[in-house]
Image: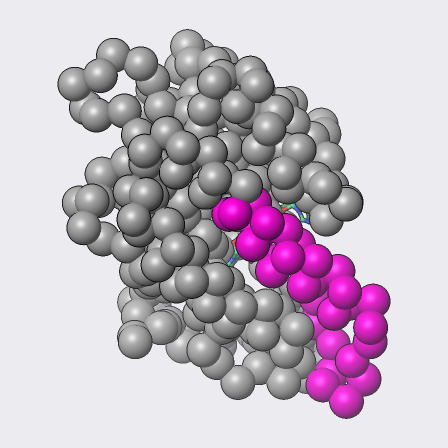
Amino acid sequence: MPKDSDIWRKRALVTGAGGGLGRQIALDLAGRGVDVAATDLDAAGVEETLALCRSAGVALLPLAGDLTAPGAPTRTVAAVTEAWGGLDILVNNAGYGGIEAFLDMNEALWDRTLAINVKALALLTAAAGRTMAAQGGGRIVNITSPASRMALPNYAAYAASKAAVDSITRAAAVALAPSGVLVNSVAPGMMDTQMQRATEAVLARIEGRADVEVFLAERTRRVPLGRRAEIAEVSAAVLWLALDAPPYITAERLNASGGLDRD
Ligand SMILES: NC(=O)c1ccc[n+]([C@@H]2O[C@H](COP(=O)([O-])OP(=O)(O)OC[C@H]3O[C@@H](n4cnc5c(N)ncnc54)[C@H](O)[C@@H]3O)[C@@H](O)[C@H]2O)c1
C-alpha cells in the first residue's frame, strides 16, 4: 500500500455498490480521494453511484455483474488491476439475506445466500490478497452482521453465512499478515436499506405480526442506543479500517451496532 507521503492515489474495489451501504462507502472513499471500482448485480445502480462520485475528481470504474458466476471474483479483481495497475482496498459489502421459517428452509435460498455472502467473499479476498501481497500491502474490510452471533431461527442461512464471514476474516488476516495485508470486518446495526426493509416485512409476516410499524418500533427499542444506524455512521467505521486505523489492527471485528452486539 502506498505510504501517506506517496503521491499516487489509493485504489479501492467496493462490492454491492449499486445502493445501500455500498453506495455510501463508494461515495465516502471517493470523497477521501480514493479511486473507486464499483460492482453490483444492479448495473444501473452502479452507474448512479459512480455519477454521485464524479464530483470528487477520482478515477471511477463500473464493473457490474453477478459475483457468484464462475470465475467472477478473480475476473473482477483482474479488471481493476488491469485498469489501474493494482488494488489497495477491497470492501466486501455485497450480500443477500432471506427470511424463512426454520422448518420450511429451502435449498435455493441457502445456495443464493452462501454463494454471495461466503463463497464470493472468500474468493474475492483471496484474489485481492494475491494482488496486495505482491504489492507489499493493502486493506480488506468485510461486512459481517450482529446476526452472526445470534440465534435467529427464521434467518438461519443469513446468520450462518455471516458467521462464515467472521471465520474467513480471521483466516485471511492470518494468511495475509506476513504480506502486510490487513483484514478486518464491520458489523453494522440495523440500517434502513432496501435489504433491511424487505427482510423485516417478511419477518413480521412469518412471526404473525399484522402491524409492521409496531413490530419495527419494538425491534428498534432493543438497540441500546435506542435508534437504527445511519448508513453514514457504518460507512465511517468501514473507512476508518480501510484508511485510518493503525496498521497493527488486523483480524478485528468492529461493532457499529448501537450496542446490539457487545462482544
Ligand atoms: N441493512 C442492515 O441493517 C444490515 C445489517 C447488518 C449487515 N448488513 C450487511 O451490509 C451489507 C450491505 O447491505 P445493504 O443493507 O446495503 O443491502 P442492499 O441490498 O441495499 O445491498 C446489497 C447489494 O449487494 C448486491 N448483491 C447481492 N447479490 C449479489 C451478487 N450475486 N453479485 C453482485 N452483487 C450482489 C445487491 O444487488 C445490493 O446492491 C450486506 O453485506 C448486508 O448483509 C446490513
Above/below status of 131 relative to 35 = below
Residue drawn at 39 percent across, 55 percent down: 175
- Report the span colored magenta: 98-126
Tell me if residue 48 can be seen.
no
Residue 111 painted magenta: yes
- In depth, the one of 202 and 17 nearer the eye is 17
- In depth, the one of 174 and 25 nearer the eye is 174
Residue drawn at 32 percent across, 33 percent down: 136
Q: Residue 104 at x, y = what percent? A: 81, 84
Tell me if residue 94 can be seen.
yes
Residue drawn at 70 percent across, 72 percent down: 99
Q: Is residue 126 left or right of residue 224?
A: right
Residue drawn at 51 percent across, 47 percent down: 125
Residue 259 painted magenta: no
Q: Residue 47 at x, y = what percent? A: 64, 23
Residue 33, by quadrant, is top left
- In depth, the one of 134 and 171 nearer the eye is 134
Above/below status of 232 relative to 39 = below
Q: Residue 260 at x, y = what percent? A: 36, 72
Q: Residue 11 at x, y = what percent? A: 42, 25
Q: Is residue 201 left or right of residue 148?
A: right
